[in-house]
Amino acid sequence: MSESVIRCRSLYKIFGLNPAELRIDGDGAVEPALLKREGVVAAVNHVDLDVSPGEILVVMGLSGSGKSTLVRCLSRLVEPSCGLVEIEGADLLAMNDRELIELRRSKMGMVFQNFALLPHRTALENIAFPLQMRGMKRRDYVERARKMIALVGLEGRENNFPRALSGGQQQRVGIARSLAVEPDIWFLDEPFSALDPLIRKEMQDEFLRLQSLLNKTIVFITHDFDEALRLADRIAIMFNGRIEQIGKPEDIVLHPATDYVARFTGDVPRERVLRVGSVMDPPSDEETTTDRPVRVTDRIDTVAEYVLGQQLPVPVIDAEDAVVGVMHQAHVLEVLFSRTERA
């Protein structure tokens, strides 16, 4: 794995506890008795996390699980109580105000559920605003803002004020504004949850298109498993401030690490999560297979009708069209309908 862009170890955010009272053991853990004290809330509780270059890490959890506090600790919008956070190897918690501001300006983009557009500025002016704050020349920041307008598909709307834009268009302005500073790291906290379902899907498509072009390192917060499945390279599931499990979507669904994760993912349709590579068997020269193969990266729901309709095993091929496995009808049915067992 490439060196982590974001790395945190033994990260805590504890409300209701004076930092001077913290007692930490050799593993970086806060004394359990302190966390059980009345009035104390560990919103982020002993979190270890690595995010690789170009990865989309989706953090999930129910309301109050700590996911939003975690992403704010990673950007130091919320001051962690203790622990380690590194951004490209630099110690975030050791930075002074000037260094922190410069890091956010040069490295980080942030998008939240509240669009927070300036109502008296046009779409173009909203996008250009952070560039103005950096002292960029007018000609340069207008040119950059126009490029962002084109990137998010808002040509012809650049002179509209926020009140004249739909919810989806306002969110595009917010995304364009965060991208205008060309961040390497992108934090998004439930950015689409206020949108209606159709616009939400369009924004997810737009997000994936932008990521294919820009290859940002992304931490994306959501409570919607369907959204996570569409977007995530890996998923982290939080509960009571802790990360219960982190891994690829198919690994979490097939091999939940805790009872909570098993319950959290219990109603997720497996065929929408699993890829062919997760359920294929090793190839055999002795088996006769169908003439039409499926790809190892295909999602099960896109090939299930074909595979389950065949009497013969179906060959599985990789990106170079080499056979890397076979799909047996019985095995597919077993994986889709068997009970999940904890890892």
Image: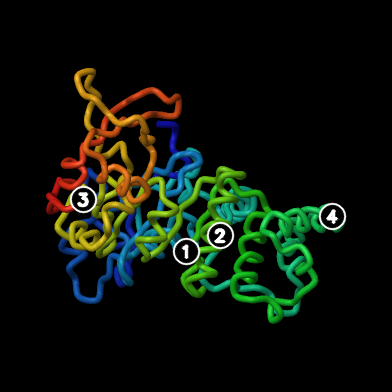
Q: Secondary structure at mark 2?
A: strand
Q: Place residue 168 in its image quadrant.
A: bottom right
Q: Which residue is mark 2?
A: 110
The disc at residue 137 is: 4
Residue kind at label 2, given as amino acid type = Met
- Mark 2 vs mark 4, foreground winner is 2
Q: Residues within 10 Å of mark 1 (few under 14, many from 20)?
A: many
Residue 79: image location, x then y, percent? 44, 61
Res. 158 visible in picture: yes
Q: Secondary structure at mark 3?
A: helix
Q: Earlier in the sequence, mark 4 or mark 3?
A: 4
Q: CA distance from mark 3 to mark 2?
A: 38 Å
Q: Residues within 10 Å of mark 4 (few under 14, many from 20)?
A: few
- Mark 3 vs mark 1, foreground winner is 3
Residue kind at label 3, given as amino acid type = Leu
Q: Secondary structure at mark 4?
A: loop
Residue kind at label 4, given as amino acid type = Lys
Q: Are marks 1 and 2 in contact (CB under 8 Å)?
A: yes
Q: Which residue is mark 1?
A: 189
Is residue 328 shown above or below 117?
above
Q: Are marks 3 and 1 in contact (CB under 8 Å)?
A: no
Viewed as shown, does residue 166 lie left or right of 294?
Answer: right
Q: Place residue 125 in its image quadrant.
A: bottom right
Q: Earlier in the sequence, mark 3 or mark 1?
A: 1
Q: Are marks 2 and 4 in contact (CB under 8 Å)?
A: no
Residue kind at label 1, given as amino acid type = Asp
Q: Which residue is mark 3?
A: 336
Q: CA distance from mark 1 to mark 4?
A: 31 Å
